[in-house]
Amino acid sequence: SYRKGGYHAVRIGDPFASGRYIAQRKLGWGQFSTVWLAYDTQTSKYVALKIQKSAQQFAQAALHEIEVLCAIADGDPSNSKCTVRLVDHFKHAGPNGQHPCMVLEVLGDSLLQLIRFNRYKGLELDKVREICKCVLIALDYLHRELGIIHTDLKPENILLFSTIDPAKDPIRSGLTPILERPEGGNNLNGGSTMNIIEKKLKRRAKRAVANISGRRDSMGGAVVKPARCLDVIDMRCKVVDFGNACWADKRFAEEIQTRQYRAPEVILQSGYSFSVDMWSFACIVFELSTGDMMFAPKTGEGFSEDEDHLALMMELLGKMPRKIAVGGARSKDFFDRHGDLKRIRRLKIMPLDRLLVTKYKFSDTDAREFREFVSPLLDFSPEKRPTAQQCLQHPWLNPRSSDGKSKVDAGMSKLKI
Ligand code: ATP
Ligand code: MG
Ligand code: MG
């Protein structure tokens, strides 16, 4: 991918935007870009530099993403809506072409990493609730105030958010800026000569995640030193990756969403709206709470991945109403005229709360309350799914302790003392 039209190869210490930003280390990558931690010499702050591939279709996608990110920033001057903030953008000319670059605020590890570091065991429900609130604030803002559908909500695209500013507190955050290219060596893409620093930073990041996900003991208790995400008091996170986002009145793609988080109306091609994000949100809540994906369809003998996906949905949520099953442009590929799947004839029904109790050892109460929050989001009728605004009001997010106070508020006031 590091060829004409592809990624731009970066060396640690490389300058961008006439020397304003200095590359520090790689934070991540996707199909479209590599993302680097960079030091902003003008503001003395760290930023995340998303460097897009240069070929025309990628460059165009970046311009669209910048347009969406600008709308998000304009509508949220106080940066409180749990969506990533764009601070600057420019073009960078390199040997592989002209690369659109986005300068974003630096965020931390993704929820996917958090799930992995928690050894796929699922997080405590109180932590899941905190994450849910952030994601819902973001979705409510995008949907209701901006009219934007994210269309690719998944754990990878939700990043933890540290409250320490690394530029103000580089020691505690575990970061000190590199201002020029280290001598000698070929550290293309953050490899070779920077290995030691990279490894150190990675170890720190690991410790940080382990700590917020509550694995302090297994990491040796007090041995854990302060690191980037350590001082996160409440689980906070932000939604990122607006490359596929669209305005609800200007949809451009039929096939949206990453497979496991895809809503049934997208598979059936019966039209979609904001509620596709609510479906993905429900899948994420399940995954955070159990460590397993809610739906992981596979192609089988005589049936497609799509048909398996629809079967898995019905096994967990009950039969799809006939009208919905036969109502999409692709319905005939999967359903007969009675609304039964053509190739998968026998379904193994396992309702959500029973699954939570038997497989994931939830208490009866936890399972029931979880189901009451999550299953309306998985309604086969998209227009019946609750909105993000309605979800924010749900009692599951604000459990009351016996003295009638919200548990979360009580926890907060304790922390202030
Ligand atoms: P995709 O193939 O998912 O569309 P993409 O090329 O559009 O990917 P992003 O998903 O925006 O790129 O970013 C790729 C990765 O870089 C993320 O998964 C994350 O690990 C990291 N990343 C992105 N933005 C930030 C940020 N603001 N702070 C820290 N890390 C980030
Ligand atoms: Mg992504
Ligand atoms: Mg993207």
Image: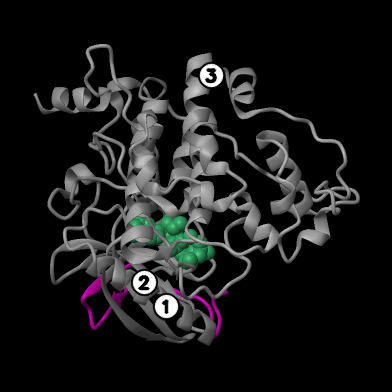
Q: Which residue is label 1 attached to?
A: 64
User: Which numbered circle lies on residue 362?
Assistant: 3
Position of the N terminus by quadrant = bottom right
Kindly indicate whether the residue at mark 1 contacts the one at mark 2 (C-beta within 8 angstroms). Answer: yes
Residue 255 in sight from this viewpoint: yes
- Where is residue 37? Give x, y as percent: 32, 61
- Where is residue 342? Give x, y as percent: 87, 50
Extreme-top residue of the structure: 402
| Label 3 residue near ligand 1, CB within 8 Å | no
Q: Which residues are magenta?
A: 1-21
Magenta stretch secondary structure, dominant: loop
Q: CA distance from mark 2 to mark 1?
A: 6 Å
Q: Secondary structure at mark 3?
A: loop
User: Which numbered circle lies on residue 260?
Assistant: none
Residue 200 in sight from this viewpoint: no
Q: Is residue 13 left or right of residue 265?
A: left
Q: Amino acid at mark 3?
A: Phe
Q: Secondary structure at mark 2?
A: helix
User: Which numbered circle lies on residue 68?
Assistant: 2
Mark 2 vs mark 3: which is more N-terminal?
2
Mark 3 vs mark 1: which is more N-terminal?
1
Q: Amino acid at mark 1?
A: His
Q: Within the magenta stretch, is there residue 396?
A: no
Q: Residue at x 59, y 35 (%)?
A: 292
Q: Within the magenta stretch, is there residue 18?
A: yes
Q: CA distance from mark 2 to mark 3?
A: 40 Å
- Disc 1 crowd rating (10 Å Cα; few below 14, some 14-19, many 20+) is some
